[in-house]
Image (cartoon, rainbow, N blue to C red):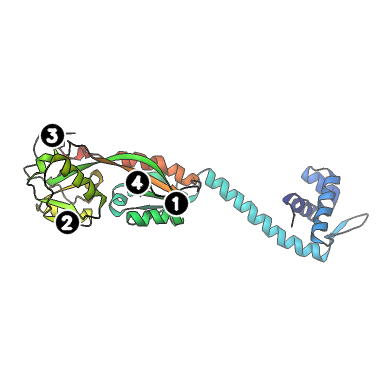
């Protein structure tokens, strides 16, 4: 079928005007071109749409049925175009973003609140999930984008670095490690440590720090969740090496964060989306807000942090 929008527009103009000449005047088209468009439409459909007399043009029964159908199609098309324009102008839309639970808690509420002030017509749906689930959600299209720290590689995924997040030591304010001066990994020797489980990327980086400093990593506790690690630190049961955004899990003022040096260990926080899939105008507008919020994560909350 080779019916064109030009042919449908010509048909509707004639049907509404009851005259080829009036339709041509209304649409600012040449009458012969308008007549030709209608003839081509009738030829494609294999039936006459108008009964033509010297005085007027009237719809045939087939023409009346066709008019009802195509008016709905044109109305839907106009609405679709308006919606796309509104989305392109960032007046409306929807974003589905996936992030790990703690990073979602530390970053997304503030970013969403700021974004909605500027773009109230765009809704943001939050999916809190594990890293593997985030990647799969983005690949499958269940999420438009994902926020987090991701392992190298990953087919079908494009990454945008938002900020570098440095590993820090979190300890109770009464800890001997809460003292002025630089804090090196070697200073952790003999410290009761709350560690993430061996499957965690944070644990792998922690092992790198201990190995580089030449000290043994012998955790007193191994946990799966940063919130659990922080609760143990708050109870004075040990110190924990965690990313900066773990501050979001602090429930009271008894925990302090110290920068770790020798070596400095950091990782990138990325925004990911599916490779080959166009980033929506809504996501494009949300990205700089996310970047500012992620970069605002700072260890400056700790009075004993010595950069």
Closer to us: mark 2 or mark 1? 2
Q: What kind of element bears circle 3?
A: loop
Residue 53 pos. (x, y %): 92, 57
- Dot placed on the residue nearer the N-terminal end, 4 or 1: 1
Q: Is residue 144 left or right of residue 84?
A: left
Q: CA distance from mark 4 to mark 3?
A: 31 Å
- Dot placed on the residue nearer the N-terminal end, 4 or 3: 4
Closer to us: mark 2 or mark 3? 2
Residue identifier under label 4: 152
Q: CA distance from mark 4 to mark 2?
A: 25 Å
Q: Nearer the viewer, residue 16 or 276?
A: 276
Q: CA distance from mark 2 to mark 1?
A: 33 Å
Residue identifier under label 3: 182
Pointer 4 and pointer 1: residues touching (CB < 8 Å)?
no
Closer to us: mark 4 or mark 2? 4
Pointer 2 and pointer 1: residues touching (CB < 8 Å)?
no
């Amino acid at each position: 079928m080779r019916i064109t929008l030009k042919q449908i527009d010509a048909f509707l103009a004639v049907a509404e005007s009851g005259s080829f000449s009036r339709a041509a005047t209304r649409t600012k088209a040449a009458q012969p071109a308008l007549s030709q468009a209608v003839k081509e439409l009738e030829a494609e459909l294999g039936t006459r749409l108008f009964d033509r007399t010297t005085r007027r043009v009237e719809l045939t029964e087939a023409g009346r049925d066709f008019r009802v159908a195509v008016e709905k199609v044109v109305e839907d098309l106009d609405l679709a175009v308006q919606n796309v324009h509104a989305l392109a102008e960032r007046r409306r839309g929807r974003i589905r973003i996936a992030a790990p639970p703690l990073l979602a808690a530390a970053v997304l509420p503030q970013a969403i609140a700021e974004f909605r002030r500027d773009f109230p017509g765009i809704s943001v749906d939050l999916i809190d999930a594990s890293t593997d689930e985030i990647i799969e959600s983005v690949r499958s299209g269940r999420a438009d984008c994902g926020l987090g720290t991701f392992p190298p590689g990953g087919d079908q995924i494009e990454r945008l670095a938002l900020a570098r997040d440095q590993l820090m030591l979190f300890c109770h304010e009464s800890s001997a490690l809460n003292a002025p001066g630089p804090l090196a990994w070697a200073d952790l020797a003999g410290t009761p440590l709350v560690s993430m489980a061996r499957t965690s990327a944070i644990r792998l980086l922690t092992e790198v720090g201990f190995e580089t400093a030449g000290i043994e990593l012998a955790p007193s506790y191994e946990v799966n969740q940063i919130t659990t690690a922080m609760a143990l630190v708050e109870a004075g049961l040990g110190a924990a090496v965690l990313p900066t955004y773990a501050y979001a899990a602090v429930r009271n003022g008894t925990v302090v964060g110290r920068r770790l040096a020798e070596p400095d260990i950091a990782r990138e926080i990325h925004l990911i989306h599916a490779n080959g899939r166009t980033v929506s105008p809504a996501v494009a507008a949300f990205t700089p807000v996310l970047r500012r919020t992620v970069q605002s994560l700072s260890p400056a909350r700790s009075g004993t942090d010595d950069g």
